Image (cartoon, helix red, strand yellow):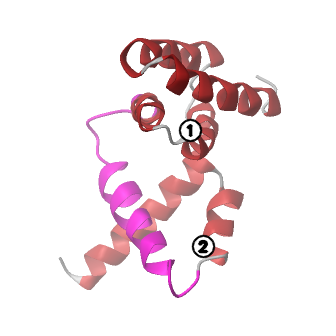
């Protein structure tokens, strides 16, 4: 892949990442990057957000639902918190988020879903939804 193509993916990724997670969150992540973790931030922006989230096969709402389910399954509550904000930004309702988490209860277990419900409840309350 040419350097120009990678730069385009990075810029596309930054735009989508800011739209989904919020510019303040993304800009703080980039501002606080160190020489040690800057390559990780660039990789996430370029490939996760630029190469995958920009694909036409799924809507952002669908991608958010999938993320919430996967992150719950993995027990990554910090990331659940971030992606509940993203899900709200992508137009999911609190009822849809609840349905995703209820679905994960069956397949991932009560403790995993309970943690995600706690985090999601906090974020939804902060957003006044």
Task: Provide the residue span drawn in magenta.
Answer: 34-62
Q: Is residue 92 above or below residue 6?
A: above
Instruction: Residue 11: say if magenta.
Output: no
Residue at the spot 67% in from the left edge and 32% down from the top edge? 119
x, y (%) of residue 94? 64, 18
The picture quadrant where one finds residue 60 is top left
Quarter of the image that includes the C terminus: top right
As drawn, is 32 to the left or to the right of 67?
Answer: right
User: Which numbered dot is residue 30?
Assistant: 2
Q: Are marks 2 and 1 in contact (CB under 8 Å)?
A: no
Q: CA distance from mark 2 to mark 1?
A: 20 Å
x then y, percent, for residue 19:
57, 50
Q: Residues within 10 Å of mark 2 (few under 14, many from 20)?
A: some
Quadrant of the drawing holding the N terminus: bottom left
Q: Which residue is mark 1?
A: 80
Name the mark on residue 33: none
**Mark nearer the N terminus (2 vs 1):** 2
């Amino acid at each position: 892949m040419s350097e120009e193509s990678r730069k385009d993916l990075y810029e596309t990724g930054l735009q989508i990442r800011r739209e989904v997670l919020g510019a303040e969150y993304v800009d703080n992540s980039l501002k606080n990057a160190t020489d040690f973790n800057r390559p990780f931030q660039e990789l996430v922006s370029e490939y996760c957000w630029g190469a995958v989230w920009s694909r036409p096969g799924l809507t952002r709402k669908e991608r958010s639902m999938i993320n919430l389910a996967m992150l719950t399954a993995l027990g990554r509550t910090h990331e659940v918190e971030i992606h509940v904000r993203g899900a709200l930004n992508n137009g999911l309702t609190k009822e849809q988020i609840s349905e995703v988490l209820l679905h994960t209860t069956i397949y991932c277990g009560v403790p995993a879903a309970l943690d995600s419900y706690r985090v999601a409840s906090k974020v939804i309350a902060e957003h006044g939804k």
